[in-house]
Image (spheres, coloured by chain):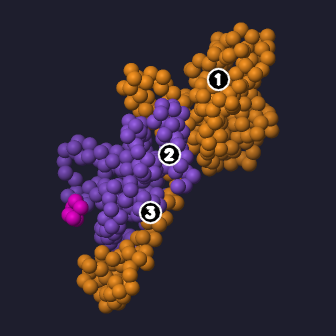
Chain colours: A purple, B orange
Amino acid sequence: MSERTSEDLMLIERAQHGDKSALNELVRKYEVRAYQFAFRLTRNPEEASDVVAEAFVRVFNALPNFKGNSQFTTWLYRILTNCFLDLRKRESRRQTLPIDAGVQTDEGEMERQYEDPKGTPHDSLERNERGQRIEQALKKLPEYQQAMIMMYHAEQLSYEEISEALDLPIGTVKSRLNRARVSLRELLARDEELFRI
Amino acid sequence: MNVSKARDFFSDYFEGKLDAGLRQSFEQALKSNPQIQAEYEEFALMMNTLAELPNEEIDIPIYLSDRIATRLEAAQEKRTASVPAWFGWFRNLALAGVAGAVLFGAAAGLLSKGGSVATGDLFNFGAKPVKPRNELTFAYTNDKVVVTYNTSDNRALMVDKRRITPENGSVISPLSNSNAFAAEFVIQVEGSEVPERVYIPGSTTREASEGTGNLADFAKALADHYRVPVRVTAPSVELPINWNLSDADAYQCATAALKSQPVSVDLRDGNFICITGR
């Protein structure tokens, strides 16, 4: 067990026994990492902050039931992912007009577009063009696939850690990730001219 | 191997995880089928771009910890009846609306030091002899700002609206900030007119930039760019300041930015910027 993992487990155990400073420490330790993941999924500071705050509330509420069978970080990623998915569900319920009905994949509709609050012309110019195109294409993937891609490529979790976080067999994680990447490539290929810049 | 089947192996082939037999079949398909070849080339290009995702710099909003603290407090309130003692401590994550993880040891009973947690011994109540007046001092030693408060009439110390009653007339505590960005501590002897504000840099160094804001905003920017603590002694921080953090030296930068303001700037304990209202 790594030093970080055992330290986390000690903090959790202390928090479970009512040590108020232990959860405080866990929040301080992981809030930045949690925010980075949430921001990568939402691309919106407000939404990302809400996702992180909600995730820590769920951590707080679920701490008594945490058995320590998984790492705190993978548990946190799972909670963050669920908070993100819930946020999008709430948004889609509020949606009154369908937007951009698109390609059907075996994991759902791919074309769903969201407002990009960071998308000012100035910001756009500053960002790497290819990275920006990937960012746009990622938004069109089903949320679950977005989360998997971000966990693997941005957060650099291993297949095993993603498997633990999402409670899926490793084989399923690998095949779903491959499907997500293939879908992403298809989305990017539609804009081939820019992609080859 | 057709195109659809070949796509199933894109990731494994890219990561070199296909077994020998499948790899041979896949490579054969790559050579013989231009569509597979074109798609795989695009796939590999995309994978290389995805590999750059961790390098993206993401700014952490200044309100993040405050929001977490607020939500945790709300969650805690629901449990107040069963665990009343916990109420309020989450605010220690975000004192004065600054991104959280800001701890004043005496208030929180906790100090983060080098990633570990220490309790108790760091907070030394009653170690100093009582002096015949209320004296609040700040010293910068070993990269820490240490607050020392001695009181002859046991007057309380206010830290971000939290009331701390000294035991045996004394409080000594370091100020610690393990948050990403600078934290503000508002410290005042109860009943005194002018609060002391101390800004402790966060763990992240901000790039040099120009900025506009009030004195508190400037102090935070200064702390985070130059990695120095800043103390402001003034009735109000609502002074409009324009700054440019391109100067190599924090003191020079502060002097230049505040030259037309009713404050003086001095440097104490080596690298402790002190700004005092005139």
Same chain under badges 2 and 3? The reply is: yes
Q: Which residue is mark 1?
A: B187
Nearest to the observer: residue B246 or residue A7: A7
- Residue type, mark 3 in image: Ser
Who comes first in sequence, dot 2 or dot 3? 2
Q: Which residue is mark 2?
A: A9
The residue under the point 71% across, 25% down is B124
Magenta range is: A102-108
Q: CA distance from mark 1 to mark 3?
A: 46 Å
Q: Regarding mark 3 in the picture, which secondary structure is present there?
A: loop
Q: Which residue sits at x=38%, y=56%?
A: A164
Rounded to the nearest angstrom, the CA distance separating label 2 from label 1 is: 35 Å
Q: Residues within 10 Å of mark 1 (few under 14, many from 20)?
A: many
Compared with residue A181, is residue B185 higher up or lower down, i.e. above or below?
Answer: above
Q: Nearer the viewer, residue A43 or B15?
A: B15
**Residue under mark 1: which chain is it in?**
B
Crowding near the residue tagged with mark 2, few <14, some 14–19, many ≥20 C-alpha atoms within 10 Å: some
Q: Quadrant of the N terminus of chain B?
A: bottom left
User: Splitting the image into 4 quarters, where does residue B238 fall?
Assistant: top right
Residue hosting label 3: A158
Say if mark 1 contacts mark 3, CB within 8 Å. no
On residue A65, the disc is: none
